[in-house]
């Protein structure tokens, strides 16, 4: 399932459903589709999202350090280490954070649907 976020102040953002629902959860919102964040609620949702993303980044840095140590041990044994790393949720959240900031400045709502 794909979920698309809409705001009159910016272009649409489409994400995989599981990613979008996780970000909605991070904002402290119901993960139901469709949904809306009223303009008055955006600052709180944005603050929650940014706080949770900051926590996630710390966890990812810790996991990355552990993974790098494991990779060094596996380097001699594994020829397929040039795989691309997965795109983190923190990176995937950037467009939504930018949309929320723009909507906050313009005092307009953000909606999402499938």
Image (cartoon, rainbow, N blue to C red):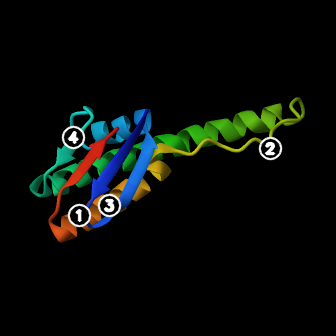
Picture coordinates of residue 86, whole percent (x, y): 61, 41
Say if 85 sits above or below 11 in the image: above
Which of the two discs, 4 and 1, labels the residue nearer the N terminus?
4
Q: Which residue is mark 2?
A: 82
Say if 92 sits above or below 100 in the image: above
Q: Secondary structure at mark 4?
A: strand
Q: Nearer the viewer, residue 85 or 17?
A: 17
Q: Nearer the viewer, mark 4 or mark 3?
A: 4
Q: Nearer the viewer, mark 4 or mark 1?
A: 4
Q: Secondary structure at mark 3?
A: helix
Q: Which residue is mark 4?
A: 35
Q: Secondary structure at mark 2?
A: loop
Which of the two discs, 2 and 4, labels the residue nearer the N terminus?
4
Quadrant for the C terminus, please: top left
Q: Which residue is mark 1?
A: 103
Picture coordinates of residue 64, whole percent (x, y): 60, 42
Left or right: residue 56 versus residue 26 is: right
Q: Residues within 10 Å of mark 4 (few under 14, many from 20)?
A: some
Tell me where residue 78 sits by quadrant: top right
Q: Which residue is mark 3?
A: 99
Residue 30 numbered tag: none
Left or right: residue 113 versus residue 13 is: left
Distance Cα–Cα, label 2 vs label 3: 34 Å
Q: Are marks 2 and 4 in contact (CB under 8 Å)?
A: no
Q: Nearer the viewer, residue 47 or 109?
A: 109
Q: Residues within 10 Å of mark 1 (few under 14, many from 20)?
A: many
Distance Cα–Cα, label 4 vs label 1: 15 Å
Distance Cα–Cα, label 1 vs label 3: 6 Å
Q: Residue at x 47, y 40 (%)?
A: 59
Q: Furthest residue to the bottom?
A: 105
């Amino acid at each position: 399932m794909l979920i698309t976020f809409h705001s009159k102040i910016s272009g649409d953002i489409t994400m995989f459903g599981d990613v979008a629902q996780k970000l909605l959860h991070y904002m402290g919102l119901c993960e139901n589709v469709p949904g809306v964040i009223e303009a008055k609620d955006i600052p709180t949702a944005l603050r929650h999202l940014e706080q949770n993303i900051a926590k996630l980044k710390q966890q990812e840095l810790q996991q990355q350090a552990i993974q790098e140590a494991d990779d060094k041990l596996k380097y001699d044994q594994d020829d397929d280490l040039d795989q691309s790393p997965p795109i983190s949720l923190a990176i995937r959240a950037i467009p939504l954070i930018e949309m929320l900031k723009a909507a906050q400045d313009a005092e307009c709502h953000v909606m999402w649907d499938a």
